Amino acid sequence: MLIGAIEAGGTKFVCAVGDESGDIIAKTSFPTKDPEETFKDVNNFFREYKVEAIGIGCFGPVDLDKKSDTYGTILNTPKTKWIQYDVLGKLKKDLKVPVYIDTDVNAAALAEYKYGAGRDVNSCMYITVGTGIGAGYVQDGNTYVGKSHPEMGHVLIQQHENDAFPGGCPYHGNCLEGLASGPAIEKRYGKKGHQLAADSHVWELEAYYLAQAIMNYFLILAPERIILGGGVMKQQQLYPLIRRKFLEMMNGYLTIENADTFIVAPELNDEQGVRGAMALVPVMLRN
Ligand code: ADP
Ligand code: ZN
């Protein structure tokens, strides 16, 4: 079975074709423009392949309430031309095959679960720390969606007493994303994350925020593994800092057998989004 996959991101789209084993046969990517132009590029790519179904991991928020009339439609986004755009309907209409949609981060979590850093556990969470912060959760091979998808990047955490930055989230100010995303780092220090690599205070504070969120996620969902990806996590020094702070904050309340294997880096080299989109098809066919 030839399967199509789309990683629909706010900055770029990745399209691929592969098979049920998850291997990619062909792949392309292009910048995200307005919806009509973007889907022209999508159609151009898929025209050459006879795919039987498509999986899409989509940026959000997106309506994933199956009972909703607007299922598969983009909701509020700073990319105003995409607001209320019916991504699912457009793909079904143009490509005339079944289309399965989930969030970009749920797709990434599914790929890491099946092929990457979560392949030896029954539940894992994938968190991206990039332009925004988002997280997806997979248990026993299924991604978690409630009434609609979780928005775990916007949880409230305690701000550090020495951090005067008001936070950059347009909705909540100092939520996790507002304090710890790539743009938050840039606004707080006036420099991009990669230019601050040598400044240990930056990463101590970043780890303080991420560890709090991970503690919350762990207390709520008890995943067996937390996989941290995205541009900001290219700062490898964050992993040991986050593990240490997470253990300090947990304060022995629950047993963490080995923090080194609990909080880990992704293993799929930035391909988790598109490989996860492909993996949505067999999961959704099974359900
Ligand atoms: P997106 O979230 O848009 O898909 P990324 O995951 O690459 O893309 O995240 C981009 C953000 O990550 C930017 O804010 C950028 O400054 C930050 N970033 C990218 N590379 C690094 C790095 N090496 N160190 C710290 N921050 C980085
Ligand atoms: Zn927020």
Image (spheres, rainbow, N blue to C red):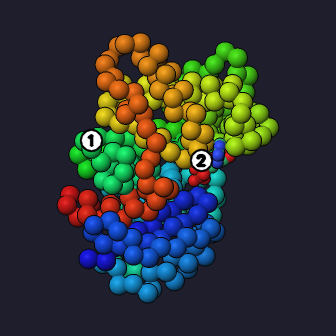
Q: Is residue 283 left or right of residue 110?
A: left
Kind of residue indicated by mark 2: Gly
Res. 216 in view: no
Q: Position of residue 7 (x, y in %)?
A: 47, 63
Kindly identify which numbered label has been placed on residue 209. Answer: none
What residue does disc 1 label?
A: 121
What residue does disc 2 label?
A: 231
Res. 19 in view: yes
**The N terminus, quarter of image:** bottom left
Answer with the quarter of the image where residue 188 lies.
top right
Q: Look at 40% across and 80% down and name the residue there.
A: 95
- SS type, badge 2: helix
Kind of residue indicated by mark 1: Val
Q: Position of residue 279 (x, y in %)?
A: 32, 61
The number of callouts visible is 2
Q: Position of residue 54 (x, y in %)?
A: 36, 71
Q: Give the CA distance from mark 2 to mark 1.
A: 25 Å
